[in-house]
Image (spheres, coloured by chain):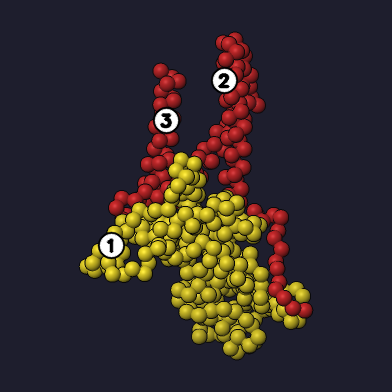
Amino acid sequence: MSDSKTITLELFRYHPETDSEPRFQSYEVPYDEDWVVLDAINWIKDYVDGSVTHRWSCRMGVCGSCGMMVNGEPKLTCAAFLKSYYPFPVRVEPLVNFPVERDLVVDMDGFMEKLRDVKPYIIRDDVNDTSQGEYRQSPAELAQYKQYSMCINCMLCYSACPVVGHEEEFLGPAALALGHRYNKDSRDRGKSERMEVMLSNEAMWGCTFVGECSVVCPKHVDPAGAIQQAKAMGAQEYFKRFVMPRGAGTKGAGASRGAGA
Amino acid sequence: MSGQYHRSHSRAWFLERPGYIRFMIRELTSFFVAAYLVVLILTLGRAAAGEAALAEWLQALSGTGWMVAHGVALVMAVWHAVTWFKAVPQAMPIFIGEKKLDAPVAAVLMGYGPWLTVTAGVVWWAVR
């Protein structure tokens, strides 16, 4: 801890049992240039006010639990250093575009439902047949979707997206990027199932390519790019249904199987 | 007192982040592109009406007000094009094997290159 410098944290407080409206509460926190915003919140909870409620887990940008609004920007608080804000106050709020459960904790249920809707897993009917060996995939095939598989579901992109806040039906950046990730996977055969969901009304087409989801993504997933590619894929699927009414889009590029190398 | 707190959305949401403002400017530039397309269609209509009608129309278009409008439309159209060329590598990534082509290279290949080529062709056709 360096000298006796302090920094002010203004925390969003809302307790559903007692509050009808949220308020901001200021705390003076010891300033250490190695500390991140999450360290400061943890210090407040440990030494000043145990009623402060927030989510966190890994403290290393992997779990995606500690996403909050830091001075109006969606950030992983474990990656937002106090020295970036010192000596000015740091205002911490729960992620916007989500209902607030308590203090800095938001309700993730809507996000989880949207994630489930895009079936973010490999779909194929011979999934239990392992006698033929593993599904092979070339580095070039992996490169097609690897970037989109880096999503940690931190939901920062949902807070940066103005469409999420205004269009209930929109599936949102992370869910669509994950749907696209599996559509691009050469081992997958579930594109038509996913597209059934993604093509409906505003689920995907609500995206106006503002692009801020990609700007705030801590893992450089580029959900905005994934959604534009998914739109192009969706348009192809739509027209294929007229040209090839039977079996359009049911088959992927095809991963070969072979004995273990 | 119990339950979740739902935050309301500002009607001026597009002012909340610089990225939103850039997005709105990009979208608004399309109005100028569309408006200038109307001018071009009217020009074609005048051309179809005959040489005298076209000459009269072009004379009107060379007035001060129209020249300002041409200039504004040009700036807006260039801005619109540049923002979309920037977006093209995101929407249409090019892979060479397992390597994705760098965004600036892809923007030149799919955006600026064809744009400048076509523009040069049009200029050559107009002044030859």
* Label annotation for residue A257: 1
Chain identity for the colour red used in the image: B
User: What residue is pinned by disc 2?
Assistant: B44
Residue labelled with disc 3: B118
Which residue occupies the foreground of this view, A147 or A201?
A201
Q: Are marks 1 and 2 on the same chain?
A: no
Task: Report the amino acid beneath label 3.
Answer: Val
Residue A118 visible (yes or no): yes
Q: Neighbour class for label 2 at 10 Å: few (<14), some, many (≥20)?
A: few
Query: What is the letter of the yellow chain?
Result: A
Q: Chain of mark 1?
A: A
The residue at 49%/63% (across/down) is A119
Q: What kind of element bears circle 3?
A: helix
- For marks 2 and 3, give the one nearer the viewer: 2
Front in this rendered view, residue B49 or A200: A200
Closer to the camera: disc 1 or disc 3? 1
Q: Is residue A210 left or right of residue A18?
A: left
Q: Residue at x 58, y 88 (%)?
A: A46
A142 w.r.t. A30: above or below: above
Residue A233 point in image, percent of width and height:
46, 49
Amino acid type of the residue tagged 2 in the rendering: Leu
Secondary structure at badge 1 equals loop
Report which quarter residue A43 is drawn in. Answer: bottom right
Q: Is residue A139 visible?
A: no
Q: Of label 2 and label 3, which has the lower sequence position?
A: 2
Q: Are marks 1 and 2 in contact (CB under 8 Å)?
A: no
Residue A110 occupies quadrant: bottom right
